[in-house]
Image (cartoon, rainbow, N blue to C red):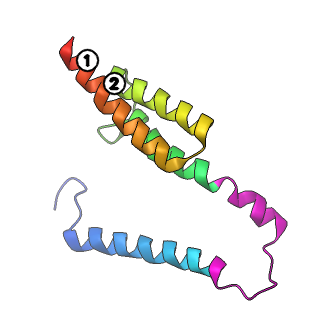
Amino acid sequence: MSGGAISAFALWAAIAGMAAVTQALRASFLLLPPGVRLPEPLRRALRYVPPAVLTALWAPELLVVDGGLSVTYDPARLAAGLVAIAVAWRLQLPFATIVIGLVALHFAEWLLDRF
């Protein structure tokens, strides 16, 4: 292995570990005994999870180039990112934001290739 490459086993182990942690966190809320309420600070903090996840999806696509932080001008990605941000702000539906953002990206790339 060279240049920071990881083995297939390490990759799959990381994916399996993240999946296990995600499922454990989700199950912990479903398996709480009846009548147990989450503390108010935790409930307030959980409201920020969807925007944080959405940001984790789009920020690397717009700000990371070749493994380093770079603010580049890629018109197709910039246009799709702005469309996705507008959809997320207006609809507040993560799945719709992802789908419409991907459609906008492909449309912008197609449009730029044509002209």
- Residue 63 percent across, percent down from the top left: 42, 34
Q: How many marks?
A: 2
Q: Which residues are magenta?
A: 29-48
Q: 15 or 31, which is in the foreground?
A: 31
Which callout, 2 or 1, points at the residue further toward the start of the chain?
Answer: 2
The quarter of the rendered structure image containing the C terminus is top left
Left or right: residue 83 versus residue 49 is left
- Residue 74 seen in the current view: no
Q: Residue furthest top?
A: 115
Q: Please, what is the three-letter code of the amino acid marked with disc 2? A: Ala
Q: Quadrant of residue 89?
A: top right
Residue 10's image quarter? Answer: bottom left
Residue 108 found in image quarter? top left
Callout 1 secondary element: helix
Q: Amino acid at mark 1?
A: Leu
Residue 79: tell me if it is visible.
yes
Residue topped by disc 2? 76
Q: Does the stretch in magenta take in 26? A: no
Asked if the residues shown at circle 2 and circle 1 are in contact, with their CB atoms under 8 angstroms apart, the answer is yes
Quadrant where the image shows the N terminus: bottom left
Element type where label 2 sits in the image: helix
Please tell me whether residue 34 belongs to the stretch shown in magenta: yes
Q: CA distance from mark 2 to mark 1?
A: 7 Å
Q: Is residue 16 above or below residue 69?
A: below
Left or right: residue 79 versus residue 50 is: left
Please state which of residues 57 and 67 is positioned toward the viewer in this rendering.
57
* Residue plotted at (80% across, 82% down): 36
Q: Which residue is mark 1?
A: 112
